[in-house]
Image (cartoon, helix red, strand yellow):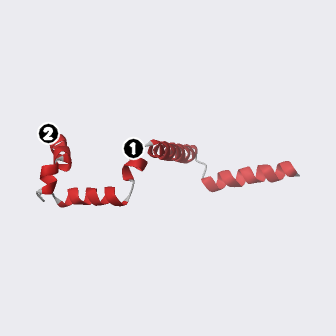
């Protein structure tokens, strides 16, 4: 638990950075922050939107797959029967 505040202090402490006492992970974080607006996408509204959409899609996909698997219907059979019903309805 004490390592998280310590790591944050080491990343934000200007004397620590100026003395060149940084570790490779800290330098990598600095380089990523310089090159990409990372925190805007990870912690802002776009990040929340993308994360919630991904969670919704994943949970829907998993739930649908489990229902198909447990009901004994394969996806091919389900698509075939839906297509046959649509074709039969047009006739």
The residue shown at (48%, 46%) is 46
Closer to us: 4 or 18: 18
Q: Residues within 10 Å of mark 1 (few under 14, many from 20)?
A: few
- Tell me the residue that label 2 is attached to: 2
Q: Position of residue 24 (x, y in %)?
A: 19, 61
The residue shown at (53%, 46%) is 57
72 with respect to 86 (left or right): left
- Tell me the residue that label 1 is attached to: 43
Q: Nearer the viewer, mark 2 or mark 1?
A: 1
Closer to us: 35 or 29: 35
Quarter of the figure with residue 6:
top left
Give the residue at the far top of this rendering: 1
Q: Position of residue 79 (x, y in %)?
A: 68, 53
Quadrant including the N terminus: top left
Closer to us: 57 or 47: 47
The residue shown at (27%, 57%) is 30
Give the residue at the far right of this rendering: 91
Q: Distance from label 2 to label 1 (Cα)?
A: 24 Å
19 with respect to 74 (left or right): left
Circle 1: element type: helix
């Amino acid at each position: 638990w004490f390592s998280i505040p310590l790591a944050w202090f080491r990343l934000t402490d200007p004397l620590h950075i100026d003395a060149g006492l940084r570790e490779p992970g800290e330098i990598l974080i600095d380089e990523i922050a310089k090159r990409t607006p990372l925190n805007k996408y990870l912690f802002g509204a776009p990040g929340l939107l993308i994360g919630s959409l991904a969670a919704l899609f994943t949970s829907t996909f998993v739930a649908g797959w489990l229902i198909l698997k447990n009901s004994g219907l394969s996806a091919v059979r389900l698509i075939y029967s839906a297509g046959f019903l649509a074709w039969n309805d047009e006739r």
